[in-house]
Amino acid sequence: MNTRLAVRALAGIALVIGTVVAAACAPQKPKGADLGASQSIKSLMEKRGLSEADVEAALKTYVPGGKYDDYMIFASGGQSGQVLVMGVPSMRLLKVIGVFTPEPWQGYGYGGDSTAVIDGAGQSGHKITWADVHHPNLSESKGDYDGQYLFVNDKANARVAVVDLADFNTKQIVVNPLVSSDHGGAFVTPDTDYVIETSQYPAPLGREYVPIDQYKDKYRGLAMFWKFDRKKGRIDPAQSWAIELPPYTQDLADAGKLGSDGWAFINSFNTEMAVGGTLEGKPPIESGASQNDMDYLHVINWKAAEKLVAEGKTTTIKGFRVLSMQTAAENGVLTLIGEPKSPHGCDVTPDGKDVIVGGKLDTHATVYNFDKIKALIDAKKYDGKDVYGIPILSFKESIRGQVEIGLGPLHTVFDDKGMAYTSVFLDSAVAKWDYKNLKLIEKLPVHYNIGHIMAAEGDTVSPDGHYVVAMNKMSIDRFTGVGPLYPQNFQLIDTDGDKMRILSDTPIGIGEPHYSQMIKIDKLKPLKMYPVGTNIYQGGIDPNATVAGKERIDRSKPGVVDVYMTAIRSHFTPDRIEVEEGDVVNLHITSLEQAEDQTHGFTINMYNVDLSLEPGKHENVTFKADLPGVYPMYCTEFCSALHLEMAGYVLVRPKGTPAPGASGSASGSASAAPSAAPNASAPKK
Ligand code: CUK
Ligand code: CUA
C-alpha cells in the first residue's frame, strides 16, 4: 500500500525534522530521495520502507506527549454500547465512556450510584446491559457545538443516553416505551431544546402484540421529541412528546437550522411495507423492500407539532403524548417527498437551505431545497396523498438537483469552503463535491466500504474544514491479523490541499462505530476534580458525604449497617467492617483527595462491587452480606507508593455468632496504615 500512498505524494512538501528544514517539489520520487533530509532521516526511511508521503503524513499527525490534539472525536462504540473519545490529528484513544454497558474502570454499573442509571435503563422490566450505539450528537447553541453534552442512541432497544461533558460521565438513559428500535437519533435541534429519536423497524406503538398480517393497519413508526432541560442536564420525559408515523422504515434524521430551524427531516426505506416470510416462500425483506423506485423523505414541522401538543391534540400512549399521523397530516406537520432507491443519510447543509439524501442502490446525492419545499407546503400544492392520507410533494419541484456521486452514496458532511463530502459505500470512496454548484470535484478511494463520514464541526452552522474521517466497515489488508473478526478502520483524511489524502489508519477494536462528531478542543471545559463529597448523579454534595474525622459505622437500624467512609492516600477509614450474615451493608465512601489525577478504586472480593473514586467523588454502595467469610477490600488504582497497602477487610460472621470485642470500630488499634501516607506516596501535590 506504500506505493499507493506514494502516488499521492504531492508537490509542496515542507519537511521539518529537528534542525533539518527542506522544501521539495518532488512527486513520485523514490524513497528518501531529494528530501534534503539529514542522512539519519533518509536511512531511517529506507530502513522502515517509508515514502516521502508516509513521512509527511506522519509529520502532519504526530502529536508529541505534552502537546494536545486540535480536535476531539466522540465516536459511536457500536455493539460495545460505549462511546470512544479520540484526539485528532493523532487519532489517539483518550477514553472509552461507559454508556449503555457497565464499564469497570469507571466503576460504572458495579454497585455504586451509577448502577441506578444502568438498572433504570431496562425495557419492560428486562435488564439490558449492552446497546447498538449509532449516532453520538453534541449539544448545540445557535446551531454550533457548545461542548456541554453528548447524546447517543441505542438502535437495538430504543434508548437515548445523556453524557455530561463536564466529567465525561453518562448521567441518564431514557427508554422509549412506544417503539421497539430506533435509528434517527440522537439528533439535536439548534439550541438543544429537543433530542430527536425516530424509530427504525415499525411495530405496534406501545410494544404490544399484533399479528404481522395487520402490519399496514397497526404497525407504526414514530418520531420522539425528547425535551432537554439544559439547567438540569437531563432529558425531561414528562415534557417530551411524539408524532406517529406510517410504517415505512424510518432511517436517518436531521434537524433544520437557521432558515429551516423548526423543521426536521427523516428518510425512509421499505415504503413497500414488506414483512419478509422467507420460510413461507415469500421474498425476504431485502428484496421486498427494493421494489419501488421511490421511498419517502418525511418533512416535519416540529414547531407546529409542538403547538398542537400544547393545545392537547394528542392521545396518550404509555404516558407519552402522541400526535396522530392524521392530525399531523391535516395540519401541515407531516409531508412526504419521494426519494430515490433505498435512501440512506439525511444531512442538512450548514446554511440550513438544503437537505442531502444518499441512496444505497442509487448513484446520486439528491439535494432537496427547503425554500422550495416550504413554498409547496404553504401553497398546499400536493402531488397526491399516500395510503394514509399524508400529502406528497412533487419530487422534481422539491429538489435543487442531483449529483452523480458513485455507487451507493450514504452520508454527507461539510467543510468551511462549500464542499460536501459523501461516503460512497459500494465504491469504497469519499466523494468531494460542491453542494452549491452541484458539481463533483474529486473522489478518494478508502479501505474499505465506508459507512459514515465525519468532518471537523461538520454538523454545525460553521464547519471547520481541515479533516474528514472515513469510518470504514472493513479493514482487509490494513492491519495485522487478529482472527476472523476484523477491526473497523478510521481513516483520517487531510482536506486542506487541492487533493484529499489519507493521513492515517486507526483500527477500532471494540465494536462497529456508525457515526461520530469532531469538536474543536477549546470548546470543551472538562473538570479536573470534584468538590469533596460530590454525588455526580444527583449533583451537589451527597447528604451522606463523610468528612475527615467523622468516619463511623452506624448499626442503629436492625439488620442494616451504614458505613461512613473516606479514602485518601493510602488508606480507607474505616478499614475493617464487621457485619453479620444477612445484614444489608450501605457503604458511603467519600474521596478526600483534591489533587489532580489522584484517583482511587474500590472493590470488595466476591460482591461484584467496583468503584472509581476520582478526587472529591462520593459513592453509595449497597449490598447484602449473604456469604459468611472474610473479604478483602482494596484500592484498584495504583495511586501511590503504598497503593498495595490501601486495603482492609469486610468480615461477615455467620448468622447468630456474637460480635467479637472491639472489631468493626472506626479506629481499630491494630491498623497498620500510617496516617502519614500521603507524604510517603505519589510525587503529586
Ligand atoms: S447508519 Cu451505520 S453507516 Cu446507523 Cu447512521 Cu449509515
Ligand atoms: Cu488508592 Cu491505590
Image (tube, grey):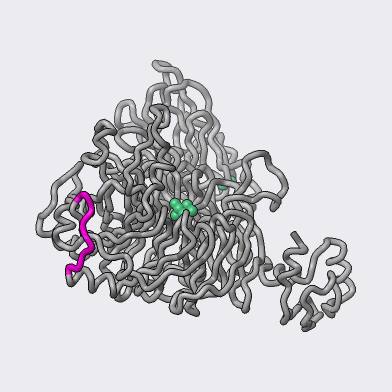
Residue 185, relative to residue 40: is it above or below? above
Q: Is residue 387 magenta?
A: yes
Quarter of the image for the C terminus: give it: bottom right
In the image, residue 129 lies at what x, y percent? 43, 38
Per the rendered image, the range of residues in magenta is 380-388
Q: How many marks?
A: 0
Relative side of 576 to 251, left or right: right
Q: Residue at x 55, y 67 (%)?
A: 431
* Foreground residue among 547 and 312: 312
**Front residue (pair 27, 232):** 27
Residue 617: % across, % down: 44, 52
Q: Is residue 254 magenta?
A: no
Identify the residue at image location x=24%, y=35%: 214
Q: Residue at 28% of width from left, 46% of height from top?
A: 247
Report the side of 620 relative to 639 (left or right).
left
Relative placement, left or right, of 137 versus 454 is left
In this rendering, does residue 572 appear at all? yes
Tell me residue 527's x, y (percent).
46, 63
Where is residue 280? Give x, y as percent.
Answer: 38, 27
Looking at the rendered image, the quarter that the N terminus falls into is bottom right
Q: In the image, is residue 163 above or below residue 644?
A: below
